[in-house]
Amino acid sequence: MSVHIVRLGSERLPHEGTRIGTVRRPPRGVPKSEFAKRNYYDVWYPELAPSVETMKLGQSAETPADWAAFVKAYKREMAEPSAARSIGLLAVLSHNADFSVGCYCEIEAQCHRSVLRELLKEQGAKLD
């Protein structure tokens, strides 16, 4: 049992479990009925996505300092009570169920999911 960090839209891995989309917006041009069939996500959970302003910081990051500013802003958002409780819940569930969380970004190191991985680990999540 563990939580997997994935790119939404990629082929599903064995034992990946339910795929949770931690993105601000659903995939463009894809009918809601097709989200799971096209390997985007089974459940949409935008509460763990960066705000629009923070997302723009990450997308425009060109230097390590820019990326650090994004990480700081995203961590601040994830420290809010609702998000922090969600991360704690996912961390606990990772010991009893297989599931995955993800985003559309191609490169995890340049995506909020790399920070989400770190936050889950800090809360004791069992990661793949």
Image: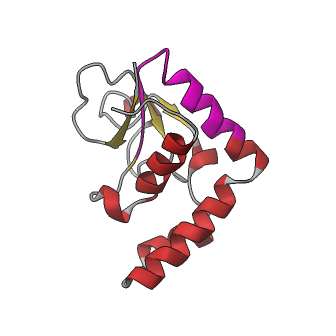
In the image: residue 4, left or right of residue 51: left
92 versus 113 height, above or below? above
In the rendered image, which quarter contains the N terminus?
top left
- Tell me residue 60's x, y (percent): 43, 80
Here the colouring is secondary structure
- Tell me residue 21's x, y (percent): 47, 40
Based on the displayed image, in which of its 4 quarters is residue 34 positioned? top left
| Residue 89 on the magenta span | yes
**Is residue 120 visible in this depiction of the protein?**
yes
Residue ranking furthest to the right: 81
Q: Nearer the viewer, residue 22 or 32?
A: 22
Residue at 35 percent of width and 65 percent of height: 110
In the image: residue 113, left or right of residue 6: right
Residue at 40 percent of width and 60 percent of height: 111
118 versus 18 height, above or below? below
Residue ranking furthest to the top: 96
Q: Nearer the viewer, residue 29 or 27?
A: 27
85 versus 48 height, above or below? above
**Is residue 26 visible in this depiction of the protein?**
no
Q: Nearer the viewer, residue 30 or 122?
A: 122
In the rendered image, which quarter contains the C terminus?
top left
Residue at 67 percent of width and 59 percent of height: 77
Residue at 75 percent of width and 43 percent of height: 82
- Tell me residue 78's x, y (percent): 65, 53
Across the whole image, how many numbered discs are drawn on residues?
Answer: 0
- Tell me residue 51's x, y (percent): 62, 62
Q: Nearer the viewer, residue 39 or 119?
A: 119
The stretch in magenta equals: 85-102
In the image: residue 21, left or right of residue 128: right
